[in-house]
Image: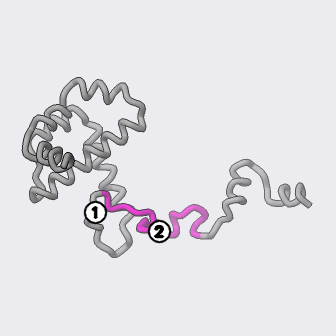
């Protein structure tokens, strides 16, 4: 099918990878809304990681032009590495998935949790942020 052809073209030929590092793609990236730029960087990061996994940790030399064209990609990969380290379940090895991050895997030490580990009612938190005291709210609805 089409996806197999695209994968073959990506991994066996340099044309697509060289096109990504071209000035027109960079100009398009610069003109795109932030959310699309983030998606593009995420996709590039995933493709680079996938290529590295497929070839024993190495990527093609043409990737250097991509990293030069998009220096944000290196920053994004560094941020992901920090998040993986931070959100790893304490005492467990990192997952082998592409992103490896799931909300239930996040470990935040109790002393760093909001409220020092105590459970906070979201309604009370909203009131505190809005400057209302619990007594004032109770009086208003009594």
Q: Residues within 10 Å of mark 1 (few under 14, many from 20)?
A: few
Q: Quadrant of residue 98?
A: bottom left
Instruction: Say whether residue 33 is left or right of residue 115.
Output: left
In-front residue for pair 58/91: 58
Q: Residues within 10 Å of mark 2 (few under 14, many from 20)?
A: few
Instruction: Please give the name of the residue rendered at 13% of the width and 33% of the height, measured from the top-left corner.
Output: 18
Quarter of the rendering occupied by the C terminus: bottom right
Give x and y (percent) for residue 115.
61, 64
Q: Is residue 100 magenta?
A: yes
- The residue identified by callout 1 is 97
Q: Magenta span covers which residues?
A: 99-117
Give x and y (percent) for residue 75.
30, 43
Q: Secondary structure at mark 1?
A: loop
Instruction: Say whether residue 108 is left or right of residue 25.
Output: right
Q: Is residue 105 magenta?
A: yes
Q: Secondary structure at mark 2?
A: loop
Sequence-wise first label, 1 or 2: 1
Give x and y (percent) for residue 60.
9, 45
Q: Quadrant of residue 56?
A: bottom left
């Amino acid at each position: 099918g089409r996806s197999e052809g695209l994968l073959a073209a990506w991994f066996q030929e340099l044309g697509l990878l060289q096109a990504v590092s071209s000035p027109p793609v960079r100009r398009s990236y610069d003109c795109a809304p932030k959310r699309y730029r983030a998606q593009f960087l995420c996709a590039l990061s995933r493709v680079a990681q996938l290529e590295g996994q497929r070839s024993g940790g190495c990527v093609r030399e043409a990737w250097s032009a991509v990293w030069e064209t998009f220096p944000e990609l290196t920053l994004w990969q560094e941020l992901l590495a920090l998040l993986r380290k931070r959100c790893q379940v304490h005492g467990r090895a990192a997952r082998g998935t592409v992103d490896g991050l799931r909300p239930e895997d996040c470990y935040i030490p109790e002393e760093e949790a909001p409220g020092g580990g105590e459970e906070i009612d979201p309604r009370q938190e909203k009131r505190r942020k809005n400057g209302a005291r619990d007594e004032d709210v109770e009086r208003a609805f009594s």
